[in-house]
Amino acid sequence: MKSSRVCVVLMVAECVLIIVSWLLSAARLEGVRSMLSSEGIRWFIGNFSTIMASPLLAWLLLALIAGGSLQQSGVVEHFMTKGEASFRNRLALRVSAVFLALYTIVICMLTLLPHAILLSVKGGLFPSAFSRSIVPIVCFGITLFSVVYGVMSGRHQKGEDVLNILSYGLRQGASLIVIYIFAIQLYASLRFVFG
């Protein structure tokens, strides 16, 4: 299903929910709040930004940046080529692997040592600062690997090129961000009406 169709379905579902919530609350059904009431309108307008600003949005943005940088940096092409890669590309892969290994070591030191900073108060990994930030940690590692590869391979040498690597995924996944906005609002509206 195309992104535009998904957006239309989500918008129609939101409109249907607004009407159904009004009808059910007019029928005095217990536990249902109308989105057309003063409380519902205040909730919808007053909480819109709060609803959007969930960790899911941050994870989506970071995943798009990581995926786009991986694709744009040339790493994927490096592994897809049938023949022997050039010396510069092999060197770039080694250097970026070293950076990724150093990053992994730092994360391990912040999580696996006794009394590590990212552990919970009781010393566990779950739940902890580490478990709450696992998606950003992974995305940053992929992005670091990709950018180092892109710079070392000579494909991207200027600051603008690095910015292009980082923003490529956001440009390609812009429709997912719009879908997220409609989907999270519909989910929050369902929780408001029936919660």
Image: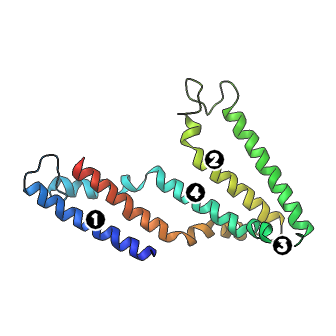
Q: Residues within 10 Å of mark 3 (few under 14, many from 20)?
A: few
| Front residue of 41 and 130 | 130
**Secondary structure type for disc 1:** helix
Residue on which disc 1 sits: 14
**Which label lies toward us, 2 or 3?**
3
| CA gap, disc 2 and disc 1 | 34 Å
Looking at marks 1 and 3 on the same chain, the residue that comes earlier in the sequence is marked by 1
| CA gap, disc 3 and disc 4 | 31 Å
| Front residue of 174 and 48 | 174
Q: Amino acid at mark 4?
A: Leu
| CA gap, disc 1 and disc 4 | 27 Å
Q: Is residue 167 above or below residue 59?
A: below
Q: Is residue 172 above or below residue 33?
A: below
Q: Residues within 10 Å of mark 2 (few under 14, many from 20)?
A: some
* Residue 18 image offset from top left, x and y in percent: 21, 63
Q: Is residue 159 visible?
A: no
Residue on which disc 2 sits: 137
Q: CB atoms at circles 4 and 2 under 8 Å apart?
A: no
* Residue 77 image offset from top left, x and y in percent: 76, 70
**Which label lies toward us, 1 or 4?**
1
**Secondary structure type for disc 3:** loop
Q: Amino acid at mark 1?
A: Glu
| CA gap, disc 2 and disc 3 | 32 Å
Q: Residue at x 23, y 62 (%)?
A: 17
Q: Amino acid at mark 3?
A: Lys
Residue on which disc 4 sits: 62
Residue on which disc 3 sits: 82
| CA gap, disc 4 and disc 2 | 10 Å
Left or right: residue 89 versus residue 126 is: right
Looking at marks 1 and 4 on the same chain, the residue that comes earlier in the sequence is marked by 1
* Residue 31 image offset from top left, x and y in percent: 16, 46
